[in-house]
Amino acid sequence: MSQNTIQCRLVASVVTRQQLWKLMADKNTPLINELLLQVAQDPDFETWRQKGKIPTGIVKQLCAVLKTDSRFIGQPGRFYTSA
């Protein structure tokens, strides 16, 4: 079996990299952590866990609500989607 390794490098100014890092560390990572927490606290979580899958749209609904939370406002749309 063969393996391919892909490497990429971010070519951007220091200022751009700093802004991206700050956005990810200060807003996106906490958003993902909050989504994980809310999913785990859902009354149906055990059922989902046993099935091995969360119903389509649950995370999207939770994220839509969190988008209006002052802690997570102002992220690019791609960040919400990736969360």
Image (spheres, grey):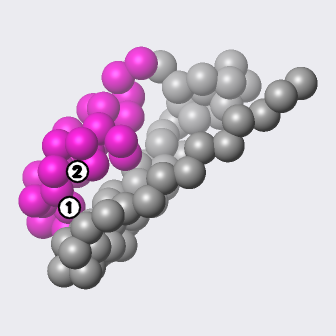
Residue 56, above or below 3: above
Q: Residue at x 37, y 45 (%)?
A: 83
Between 38 and 4, the one nearer to me in the picture? 4
In this rendering, position of residue 15 left or right of residue 24? left
Q: Residue furthest right?
A: 1
- Badge 1 marks a residue whose secondary structure is loop
Q: Which image quadrant is residue 77 in?
A: top left
Q: Position of residue 81 (x, y in %)?
A: 29, 38
Amino acid carrying label 2: it is: Leu
Q: Residue 72 shows which numbered tag?
A: 1
Q: Position of residue 1 (x, y in %)?
A: 89, 24
Amino acid carrying label 1: it is: Phe
Residue 21, above or below 66: below
Q: Position of residue 33 (x, y in %)?
A: 45, 59
**Dot 2, crowdedness within 10 Å: few (<14), some or many (≥20)?**
some
First along the sequence among labels 2 and 1: 2
On the image, numbered disc 2 is attached to which residue?
66
Pointers 2 and 1 in contact (CB under 8 A)?
Answer: yes
In this rendering, position of residue 7 left or right of residue 30? right
Whether residue 59 is visible = yes
Q: Which residues are magenta?
A: 56-83
Q: Position of residue 73 (x, y in %)?
A: 12, 59
Between 39 and 23, the one nearer to me in the picture? 23
Q: Residue at x 57, y 35 (%)?
A: 45
Between 1 and 24, the one nearer to me in the picture? 1
Whether residue 69 is visible = no
Q: Residue at x 30, y 32 (%)?
A: 60
Measured in 3D between alpha carbons, the distance from the residue under mark 2 to the one under mark 1, in whole angstroms, is 7 Å
Residue 10, above or below 4: below
Q: Which image quadrant is residue 2 in?
A: top right
